[in-house]
């Protein structure tokens, strides 16, 4: 088909401008609905992806310590989510924290009954016990356990066990293969 040069130049000028305007509008909408703030992106990924523990979260590229939701049993629609605190700094990161104590504005009472220890208690972003039931589900397959200590003088030490489990019968702790510098403390 023959088109004269006048028609081509008019058309050529209008189409690119229309595409530019459409592109600007789309970019504006994307920015509005998907903030560039890294914290917001991390929060959205925490909601969408189903990880079974903190090591999977770390492997995905999320590397900030904090509260995450995991699905420890399986990754399907019927599995129950569990909020956990992930330590992403200590010893390479990826640790699912089962107990946390420290100097927080509100101190958690740890002198509680058996039912409380079975189900868990406290504030997951501060002081807490994750719960024997939850720990047992997390460690159905073999787990490692790391215990970090800090004395009143600020001296730090740790105990690392290459094998850790918490069977269902009375939740009797099984640990082996110790390494670390905690010595007599543990």
Image (spheres, rainbow, N blue to C red):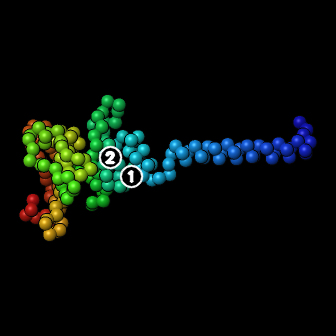
Q: Is residue 185 above or below residue 145?
A: below
Q: Which residue lies at the image location 16% right of the left edge and 50% below the top edge?
A: 108
> Residue reaching furthest front?
105
Q: 30 and 1: which one is in front? A: 30
For marks 2 and 1 on the same chain, the one whose residue lies earlier in the sequence: 1
Q: Are marks 2 and 1 in contact (CB under 8 Å)?
A: yes
Label 2 vs label 1, nearer the camera:
2
Q: Quadrant of residue 115?
A: top left
Q: Secondary structure at mark 2?
A: strand
Q: 13 and 134: which one is in front? A: 13
Q: Is residue 124 above or below residue 105?
A: above
| Residue 147, position as x, y percentages in the image | 17, 57
Which residue is the site of mark 1? 62
- Residue 143 in view: no
Quarter that holds the N terminus: top right
Q: 55 and 126: which one is in front? A: 126
Which residue is the site of mark 2? 68
Q: How many marks?
A: 2
| Residue 180, position as x, y percentages in the image | 17, 63
Cα separation between marks 2 and 1 = 10 Å
> Residue reaching furthest top?
78
Q: Which residue lies at the image location 32% right of the left edge and 43% below the top edge?
A: 69
Q: Which mark is residue 96?
A: none
Q: Which residue lies at the image location 23% right of the left edge and 47% below the top edge?
A: 123
Q: Quadrant of residue 18?
A: top right
| Residue 154, position as x, y percentages in the image | 17, 68
Q: Which residue lies at the image location 47% right of the left edge and 53% below the top edge?
A: 37
| Residue 84, position as x, y percentages in the image | 27, 46
Q: Secondary structure at mark 1?
A: loop
How packed mark 1 is, by other alpha carbons closer than 10 Å (few <14, some 14-19, many 20 or more), is: some
- Residue 64 in view: yes
């Amino acid at each position: 088909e023959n088109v004269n040069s006048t028609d081509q130049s008019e058309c050529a000028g209008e189409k690119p401008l229309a595409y530019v305007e459409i592109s600007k509008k789309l970019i504006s909408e994307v920015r509005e609905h998907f903030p560039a703030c890294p914290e917001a992106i991390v929060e959205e990924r925490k909601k969408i992806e189903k990880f079974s523990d903190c090591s999977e979260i770390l492997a995905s590229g999320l590397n900030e310590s904090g509260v995450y939701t995991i699905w420890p049993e399986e990754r399907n629609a019927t599995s129950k989510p569990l909020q956990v605190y992930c330590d992403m700094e200590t010893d390479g990161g990826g640790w699912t924290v089962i107990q946390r104590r420290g100097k927080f504005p509100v101190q958690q009472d740890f002198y509680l009954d058996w039912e409380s220890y079975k189900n868990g208690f406290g504030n997951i972003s501060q002081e807490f016990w994750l719960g024997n039931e939850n720990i047992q589900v997390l460690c159905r397959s073999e787990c490692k356990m790391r215990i970090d200590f800090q004395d009143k003088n600020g001296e730090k030490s740790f105990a690392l066990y290459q094998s850790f489990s918490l069977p269902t019968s009375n939740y009797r702790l099984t640990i082996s293969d110790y390494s670390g510098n905690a010595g007599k403390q543990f």
